[in-house]
Image (cartoon, rainbow, N blue to C red):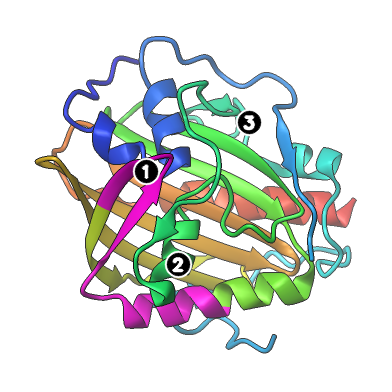
Amino acid sequence: MRVKTAGLTALVTVPALLLATACTSGDDERPAKGEGRTTDAPTSANTDTGKGGGGGGGSGGDAGGDASVPLSGPQLERAALASGDLADFQVSTGKSALAPAGQPAADRPQCQPLADAMGDKPSPRAARTANRGLGSLKNLGLAVSASLSAYTEAEAGKLMSGLKSAVAACGEGFGASLDGRRGSYREVRAAAFTVSGADETVSWTTVGTNEGAVAPIHLVVVRKGATVARFMALDLARRTPPRVPREVADKQLAKVAQVLAG
């Protein structure tokens, strides 16, 4: 699948995972085979289930296992999206070698949760994370970054609460930097989005700008117990405002439920 990324490279170097998708959605993309790389990190709520931040929690897909127990590395890899899961998408594992690692730093403290959501993982508190990149085979140019992270259930709840507060507080936008690269994100708006089987969902849109490049972005963060899925959508062809496809998020939560059920 050939995707033109000229003019957007400088912009998407700030959200590191989105850069990974942009790079792996081009000529060198390969479908995922077997397990990809899982990033491990040490870990150190009282939330409104299925409400707030423009998101909605789903009602179905309950797993038979204990969703409050963090998934292990092998479990995350089994639960993460893989080649063949979605007929209309090509799936790649891991990150591009060009993508900077880490979490962007916001210029407004109240907006840091939104900047974190554009990094390697939804927040630095993740115990481990599996990253995926998806390219649409039907809507050429639509690139989706997906990650699946294990937290303690309390930390996962705090993450969702922080995102809801940040979406409400940062409507006028914020700046973010990573490895000396800067970008700005304006028009932060809550966006309705429902995922089957989710305990909580936060969804928002924003417009990224950098050196004349402009890119609308849609982000969705979903919690199932101690597991958090994060999705970012960008239209590299710059035709229409991007949206995370519902079938991508539903499939990811369904796979989490399958692993939890054993």
Q: Around disc 1, counting alpha carbons within 10 Å, would you say few (fewer than 14), some (14 to 19), or many (20 or more)?
A: many
Q: Which residue is mark 2?
A: 112
Q: Secondary structure at mark 1?
A: loop
Q: Which of the two marks, 2 or 3, is nearer to us in this view?
A: 2
Percent coordinates x, y for residue 50 in the rendering:
55, 80
The N terminus: image quadrant: top left
Amino acid at circle 2:
Gln
Percent coordinates x, y for residue 145 in the rendering:
47, 41
* Nearer to me, 166 or 74: 166
Q: Is residue 231 magenta?
A: no
Q: Which residue is mark 3?
A: 82
Percent coordinates x, y for residue 127 in the rendering:
77, 54
Q: Secondary structure at mark 3?
A: loop
Mark sitting earlier along the chain (1/2): 1
Residue extending farthest left: 212
Q: Is residue 15 left or right of residue 69?
A: left
Q: Secondary structure at mark 2?
A: helix
Q: Residue at x 64, y 77 (%)?
A: 158
Residue 111 numbered mark, or none: none
Vertical placement of residue 99 versus 110, above or below = above
Residues in magenta, as a range: 161-183
Q: Which residue is mark 1?
A: 14
Vertical placement of residue 129 versus 116, above or below = above
Amino acid at circle 3:
Ala
